[in-house]
Image (tube, grey):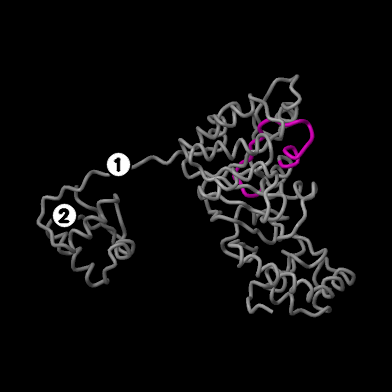
């Protein structure tokens, strides 16, 4: 068996019937997945909500779960796939807060789960020109004001793939949450889009281990990830029933902000959005300005720093420190030391020399500013 503590984190997901909620409860109770697998039947059944029947089933399947996890890790390491579990600091905090957050996320690419602005966009597979044009306009405005934003969707036909394409066209990162394992792309017609996402610092994400067969129920299950990863969910065209409405309801249960594009009352693919708005389950969104106003987002303003033009004769080390300070309005000594890679004594002497030359200003708290 692999000598890898993470084996136990993965093995939790292979225990039949444990589920994401119970997995979270058991890991919290025992302190780690490894301790859970070392527990006795008596210890298992003492956990609140885990009776004799469940404890017996869990205990009986520990060995087989570890073998499945070993096979999964071998596949992961051989196919350049990353993963995070609930016990990892890198696990997305937005998703961790959800009661039924998945115990594991597999991914291709390098998703920055700590990204400041994440928007999920979902909608009908039968997108109209109206919906696609709104999606393109919305993502274009998002990119202009928040170039660090991430667009999340499900790579399905219609609005999903339109949102991914719009993100790529506007140089935004985009993540696809799949309803199947990572060794395949469904629908296959979207493989080129998926490849372009990966080559553009995007990501493919799934909570299904390799070998999972494509099944309609899995696409419903993945909707909780689409809803949980984001700050806000936007529904662009939907019938009264379907995956987009399910995702909107999940997002509401997660206390996420939900938005919907209103449409013609006679349009089949606007009825779902109109109903979400009418029943106060979604904010009306006619433009990106509506979204930005309700989210209370503020675009980051570019700070234009004056060009460094010192009227002093500086040594090479003094200029090195001055060059770093020129990039900031104020900078503390610890950050200054890291960026100059000088020892504390060297930096203190140079700062004193710069201050005596009148090139910098020393502020309380060991903070320095270049005199401009």
First in sequence: mark 1 vs mark 2: 1
Q: What residue is at 82 percent from the left and 75 percent from the top?
A: 59
Residue 263 in which image quadrant: top right
At mark 1, the secondary structure is loop
Q: CA distance from mark 1 to mark 2?
A: 20 Å
Which residue matches tag 2? 359
Q: Nearer the viewer, residue 140 or 228?
A: 140
Q: Residues within 10 Å of mark 1 (few under 14, many from 20)?
A: few
Which residue matches tag 1? 304
Tell me if residue 211 comes above or below residue 223 in the rendering.
below
Q: What residue is at 66 percent from the left and 46 percent from the top?
A: 226
Count of numbered badges drawn on the protein: 2
The question of residue 278 being in magenta is answered with no
The question of residue 246 being in magenta is answered with yes
Residue 190 in which image quadrant: top right
Q: Nearer the viewer, residue 210 or 92?
A: 210
Tell me if residue 258 comes above or below residue 344 in the rendering.
above
Residue 339 in which image quadrant: bottom left
Q: Nearer the viewer, mark 1 or mark 2?
A: 1
Q: Residues within 10 Å of mark 2 (few under 14, many from 20)?
A: many
Residue 127 location (% of width, % of height): 68, 30
Residue 181 location (% of width, % of height): 70, 55
Q: Which residues are magenta?
A: 228-247
Q: What residue is at 66 percent from the left and 77 percent from the top?
A: 2
Residue 352 location (% of width, % of height): 17, 64
Residue 204 location (% of width, % of height): 61, 51
| Left or right, residue 38 beside residue 370 | right
| Left or right, residue 48 beside residue 320 | right
| Left or right, residue 220 beside residue 313 | right
At mark 2, the secondary structure is loop
**Given the current orientation, which residue lies at the most extreme right position?**
53
| Left or right, residue 281 beside residue 319 | right
């Amino acid at each position: 068996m692999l000598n890898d503590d993470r084996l136990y984190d993965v093995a939790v997901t292979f225990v039949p019937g444990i589920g994401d909620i119970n997995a979270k409860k058991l890991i919290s109770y025992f302190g780690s997945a490894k301790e859970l697998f070392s527990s006795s039947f008596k210890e298992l059944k003492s956990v609140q909500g885990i009776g004799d029947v469940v404890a017996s089933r869990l205990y009986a399947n520990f060995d087989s779960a570890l073998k499945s996890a070993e096979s999964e890790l071998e596949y992961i390491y051989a196919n350049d796939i990353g993963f995070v579990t609930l016990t990892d600091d890198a696990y997305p905090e937005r998703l961790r807060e959800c009661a039924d957050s998945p115990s594991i996320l597999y991914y291709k690419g390098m998703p920055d789960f700590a990204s400041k602005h994440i928007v999920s966009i979902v909608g009908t597979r039968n997108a109209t020109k109206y919906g696609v044009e709104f999606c393109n306009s919305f993502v274009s405005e998002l990119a202009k004001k928040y170039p660090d934003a991430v667009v999340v969707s499900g790579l399905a036909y219609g609005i999903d793939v339109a949102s991914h394409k719009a993100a790529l066209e506007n140089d935004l990162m985009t993540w696809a949450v799949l309803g199947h394992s990572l060794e395949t792309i469904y629908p296959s017609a979207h493989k080129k889009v998926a490849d372009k996402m990966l080559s553009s610092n995007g990501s493919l994400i799934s909570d299904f281990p390799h070998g999972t067969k494509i099944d309609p129920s899995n696409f419903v299950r993945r909707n909780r990830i689409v809803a949980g990863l984001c700050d806000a969910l936007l529904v662009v065209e939907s019938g009264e029933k379907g995956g987009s409405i399910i995702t909107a309801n999940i997002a509401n249960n997660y206390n996420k902000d939900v938005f919907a594009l209103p449409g013609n009352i006679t349009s089949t693919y606007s009825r779902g959005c109109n109903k979400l708005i009418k029943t106060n389950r979604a904010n009306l969104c006619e433009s990106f300005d509506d979204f930005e106003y309700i989210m209370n987002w503020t675009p980051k303003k570019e700070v234009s720093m004056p060009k460094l033009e010192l009227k002093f004769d500086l040594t090479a080390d003094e200029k090195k420190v001055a060059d770093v300070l020129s990039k900031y309005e104020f900078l503390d000594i610890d950050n200054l030391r890291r960026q100059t890679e000088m020892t504390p004594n060297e930096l203190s002497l140079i700062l004193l020399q710069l201050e005596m030359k009148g090139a910098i200003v020393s502020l309380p708290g060991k903070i320095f500013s270049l005199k401009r």
